[in-house]
Image (cartoon, coloured by chain):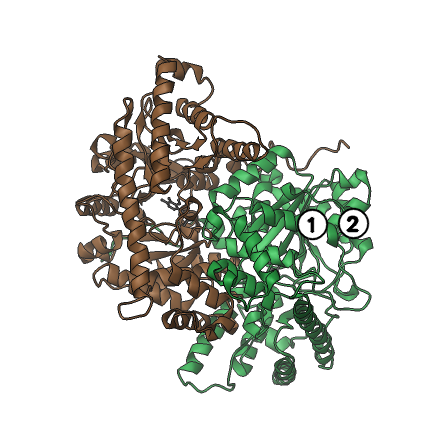
Chain colours: A green, B brown
Amino acid sequence: MSRAKVLTIDTMNPTVKKVEYAVRGPIVQRAVELERELSEGMKKPFAEVIKANIGDAHAMGQQPITFFRQVLALCSYPELLSDSTFPEDAKSRACRILQSCGGNSMGAYSASQGIDSVRQDVARYIERRDGGVACDPDNIYLTTGASDGIVTMLKLLVCGEGTTRTGVMIPIPQYPLYSAALAELGAVQIDYFLNEEKCWSLDITELQRAVNEARQYCNPRALCIINPGNPTGQVQSRQCIEDVIRFAAKERLFLMADEVYQDNVYAEGCQFHSFKKVLFEMGPEYAETVELASFHSTSKCYMGECGFRGGYMEIINMDDEVKDQLTKLLSVRLCPPVPGQALMDLVVNPPQPGEPSYGSFIKERTATLSALAEKAKLTEQVLNTVQGISCNPVQGAMYSFPRITIPEKAVKEATGQQPDMFYCMKMLEETGICLVPGSGFGQKDGTYHFRMTILPPTDKLKILLNKVKEFHQRFTQQYS
Amino acid sequence: MSRAKVLTIDTMNPTVKKVEYAVRGPIVQRAVELERELSEGMKKPFAEVIKANIGDAHAMGQQPITFFRQVLALCSYPELLSDSTFPEDAKSRACRILQSCGGNSMGAYSASQGIDSVRQDVARYIERRDGGVACDPDNIYLTTGASDGIVTMLKLLVCGEGTTRTGVMIPIPQYPLYSAALAELGAVQIDYFLNEEKCWSLDITELQRAVNEARQYCNPRALCIINPGNPTGQVQSRQCIEDVIRFAAKERLFLMADEVYQDNVYAEGCQFHSFKKVLFEMGPEYAETVELASFHSTSKCYMGECGFRGGYMEIINMDDEVKDQLTKLLSVRLCPPVPGQALMDLVVNPPQPGEPSYGSFIKERTATLSALAEKAKLTEQVLNTVQGISCNPVQGAMYSFPRITIPEKAVKEATGQQPDMFYCMKMLEETGICLVPGSGFGQKDGTYHFRMTILPPTDKLKILLNKVKEFHQRFTQQYS
Ligand SMILES: Cc1ncc(COP(=O)(O)O)c(C=O)c1O
Ligand SMILES: Cc1ncc(COP(=O)(O)O)c(C=O)c1O
């Protein structure tokens, strides 16, 4: 039949076409194909595909926190509340969550902003985290993963046309959710470059350069920060955060702080400082005026519960009318997934000293975080032994983002493809290792990188790093 | 401090401002306030607020299907797999789901399109439902509730400016997700009116009128159908569906069939026919050309699991390049919630004859569906005893949408407010019953309605209907 289609690549939404998302791009599609080919018995130079492309801890074998899963099982099937093998603190958490659900069931829609008691628990968590700085549960919005919150906030900010179109400053390299969302919303992406030479730190002079240039062609209205950084792994100093806040106030920018890796800090001398806390410590001139949204998620840190799609955002100094509009907008999608809300509740309200599950919780959390710290160190060390690879310390988050030297000859051969895409694709075909090329996150022209998660179990990570080393040496030889 | 805000109602995204969503609008906000006031001991002319505004079965006391919740508990906390009190079929379902998850954990991100094995189960379900018409799992996309799928499909379809801007035909009355999404996307909403006199049926002549008029100011590209209908409760005949498909083919419209109430059919002589099945029975001229997306959800039917945000869409005859774009777009949000995917899997693959849980599953499902059928009948009957209220049969879905006569004097007094909003607000303040005014869904000018769910338990529903009756009589007296 030859009736022309209504919806074709030429007649579809043009802003959707502009969206790119490297973390699940062509390399990953090829990795999935290779896995299928292997399972069908096809011969390959490797026995398994290792997906080091995405920060997905459980997929890499990390075990869930027992207490969290016990409570989720109890909430799913409350008959278990009479099962004596479940600890009492798990039961009391489950009861508290269920009592806040319509009909005492996770199957009821929640309020669009999220379950009241969960938002209260989030607020108390933030107060503890920030050394007592007050947090109002009314400023907390539960979300479907941090992704949902980030896209929603960007959506509110977009307006204007031509040179008055909203511009949003994002770090380069960045987590590509930002560029994808801005493309879809038709907003202007304003790049500011992190300083690779200074351990991917953020320079205010670079922010200033970026905003000044951008004012010639758009209306810069927001500044996004990822701390700890993805893909770059840096942890910002308190001083830097203060400077950023001062800059945002001076330039009248809405601040968006992506803090999903807030528990993932490994390097000595580094510490997580929330934007909220620093803002409030700077006194009322800032604390009462600078507009800030910060984002958290159940997907990262020590729990790595990505599949549940839990998250929250805290919103500070937002105009009341805009807040009403935000709530209205969220209500169209009804509510975030309730199991994800329950999980978020457990993350912000874990077992306390004296409760039966406290010991095992601390043990499990510590084991995961110290393994991650060890793997961060290991990754940096091994990669830096390779000539042509240079890797900044992985101070936090879950990735290394080393710079790689790609020989001229390989750059030429990669026609029509980014050289680091060419490199990563070749690595995948030869070793089964799936990485994301630096071009997917943005990088200075003429530099090349890849992103690799530090999540595989230590043994496996060692093998993987060795394979990367051998591949890089082979590749360099082949093309020089 | 008096620094002007970056983000204000005047500088925020103008398309977001245009969004309206009555199901959670001012009436519901007032209901929440009243609940708080009651709990603080304030005196009211009623003892509790009854939220009959939203199709939220569990919130109204409906119990979850035991088997579904057992499997979810097993998936959440797999240690329970060695607990002998769980039935074997629940365990085997849980194992199958976990084996399809990264690291055997619901905490891993799934593929963006959804878990493979779940999509296969959905495809087999559709084949059974549609009497053997083939279904390709590649055409199945798991979603975060049906809402997510619907918004995503609309997003793909939007392009053009001015008179070439995409227009989308939606029924009036409609479920307001449609108008909200179109407003946000800046697409043109094309109203076609359902025929209240003929039990809210769909006339092709009305579709034709609507599309002809719309062609003068926009580019009509899609036609949305809700069957069984929300808020109107009608179930479409096979003949009607065939006519709609023929109309869509002739007018070159992409069909979107919202079939989330596919198991909610109560009236004698009525039966659910899927658009997919009818399309394929019409032969290759239609089956191979008409583009169709159909939507399903875990939120409705007999399970009513809204909080899990599970759903799927099936996409037929979509251009391959557009499909790639769709997959890319979904990947930005990473994946739908895995517990919701697991639940969707159970809905499409429930206990089978011979399995240990079959008996109790059938019993629970039947009990819920026959109670709903009874309540549908009861609602229609009682409402039709009231002078000034006239209610079409509730053939399916979960709502009655009766027409109400509002005296002239009340219409005048409702200045600045829709008269049915005035009516519903008054009902809420006097009786504690929370309904949604017809104006939130759209209705013919000069007619007034409200939407009320049939979900409260039968006893409670009887009381509620009586209160509505008394209120209507009082209101009519007061204003005549
Ligand atoms: C910096 C950053 N922000 C946000 C997200 C989104 O995570 P989620 O939507 O799973 O919470 C990620 C995921 O990798 C991330 O790395
Ligand atoms: C007709 C219709 N479509 C879609 C939805 C969305 O439901 P969900 O996103 O919970 O699947 C609803 C919810 O009430 C509905 O009535």
Secondary structure beneath label 2? helix
Callout 1–callout 2 Cβ contact below 8 Å = no
Question: Does label 2 lie on the same chain as label 1?
Answer: yes
The amino acid on which the numbered mark 2 sits, given as a three-letter code, is Val
**Residue depicted at 28% across the width and 40% down the height:** B376
Secondary structure beneath label 1? helix
Q: Name the residue under label 1.
A: A124
Quadrant, the N terminus of chain B: top right
Query: From the viewer's perspective, is residue B162 above or below residue A480?
Result: above
**Residue depicted at 71% across the width and 46% down the height:** A211
Residue A278, disc: 2
Query: From the viewer's perspective, is residue B89 above or below residue A217?
Result: below
Residue B321 versus residue A285: which sits nearer the camera?
Answer: A285
| The residue carrying mark 2 has its beta carbon less than 8 Å from ligand 1 | no
Inspect this view and state whether residue A241 appears: yes
Identify the subunit bearing mark 1: A
